[in-house]
Image (tube, rainbow, N blue to C red):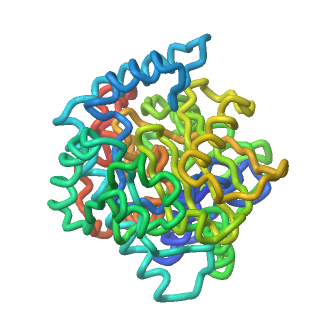
Amino acid sequence: MNVLVLGAGIIGTTSAYFLAKQGHNVTVVDRQKSVAMETSHANAGQLSYAFSSPWATPSLPLSLIKWTLGGTSPLVVNPNVSLETIKFMYRTYKNCNPNSYEINKSRMLRIANYSQKTLIDLESKFDINYEHRKQGSLQLFWSPKDLEKAKQDMAILKKFNIQYEVLDAQGCVEAEPGLQYIRNKLYGGLRFINDYTGNCYLFTSELYKKCLEMGVKFEFDSHIESFSVDNNKVSSVKTNHGELTADNYVVSLGSHSPKILSSVGIDIPIYPVKGYSITLPVLNDLDAPQSTIMDDKNKVGITRLGNTIRVAGIAHLTDHNSSLREKSLHSLKKGLNNLFPHAAKETNDINFWTGFRPSTPDSTPIIGATPYSNLYLNTGHGTLGWTMSLGSGKLLANIVSGNEPEISLEGIDMSRYKYSNKTNLNYG
């Protein structure tokens, strides 16, 4: 079977790998010059399997008010707000209730757990170096209220048999010695023992080489323009280099997925939530993070990648405006200095980056069939594309191949959005 994968980020590349592994002839198309050049390029570096959580929490509306009154906010909305931004904010707000939160988190954990198992299996088959560490992750608590809010998460984690431990301030410092300078400010933390860290760009580049060895073809510098459809099927994809045909088609274009899908009547609620990161050299090993630290209060994540520190955060609702915002740079620097004041070298050579997280209102990706019998989706992973990538790729390959999926598909495909099908077709 010939399969055409649209998108060469971490999701498209893992999809291609598992499709090729199942014996398909795979071609990947991307507008960039290589793999992982957009959202996958300089993300947070976190493989946060246990920490997979929706942005839409019951406490989010109140947090937004506090952030606004405080003058600083990890959520930034463009003053010239678009209709798409308003729709995304409203749909997200509709998920800010305990019942939706538990459903969404459970779905996310199901994919994340599967993804971790898939990564472990892949690593057992061949060596792949991606600056990885397997030392857990740490969610910080600043007050007893933070711990109380986390108890709902703990109940869900228990359902999935996910290991965690509640730490006091001293326990946090023992896990991450660099936090010693702020010990008196911390209340405690939640440590996820089996979380990992790793460089998503390096991993994708290494998997790309494996794909080439397996015969996967990559068409770079190719701008995808539109689908041609005929009798409930996609017949071809038009690019700036001509038309490409296949038996089956997979859309893994991240935040750009809705544009091409809307041309064939499919409306999926993926919004480009703009995020930022900085990467700095380590000054002193013990004063630097050893793994991943999540400061959920300020929505910033700090991760150790080799001899560098990656700081990522900010949710900027500004459609596809890719300009670098100076205030976001200062916020990320402040986020690092607040937690690890002696961790990084002072340098002007800071790798300041931005990318668009393909976010759904419920934070769950969209994986599976569409109304067209040979068109499939693997997109909408938000901030957790790296975390969910291996499981999503393997799940997608099983669906396309007609194999029995190894996890439940409940709530994962586009059918959960009742308004998403504008065509007169039935789901395939």
Q: Residue furthest top?
A: 80
Quadrant of residue 283 in the image? bottom right
Left or right: 370 in relation to 152: right
Q: In front here: 197 or 251?
A: 197
196 and 218: which is toward the camera: 196
Q: Which residue is drawn at 54% across and 63% down?
A: 178
Above or below, 367 against 313 in this view is: below
- Identified at 65% across, 57% down, the residue is 342
Which residue is nearer to you in this view: 167 or 32?
167
Compared with 406, 246 (above or below) is above
Describe residue 5's horizontal placement relative to residue 202 as left or right. Answer: left
Q: Residue at the spot x=25%, y=42% of the render? A: 144
Residue 315 at x, y percent in the picture: 53, 33
- Counting the numbered discs, the total is 0
Residue at x 65% of width, y 46% of height: 277
Residue 39 sits above or below residue 86 on the image: below
Residue projecting furthest to the right: 348
Where is residue 171 drawn, in percent x and y?
A: 35, 65
Residue 340, horizontal then vertical, whole percent: 58, 54
Residue 300 shows in the view: yes
Q: Can residue 401 be seen in this view?
A: no
Horizontal and vertical percent for residue 421? 36, 30
Nearest to the observer: residue 283 or residue 64? 283
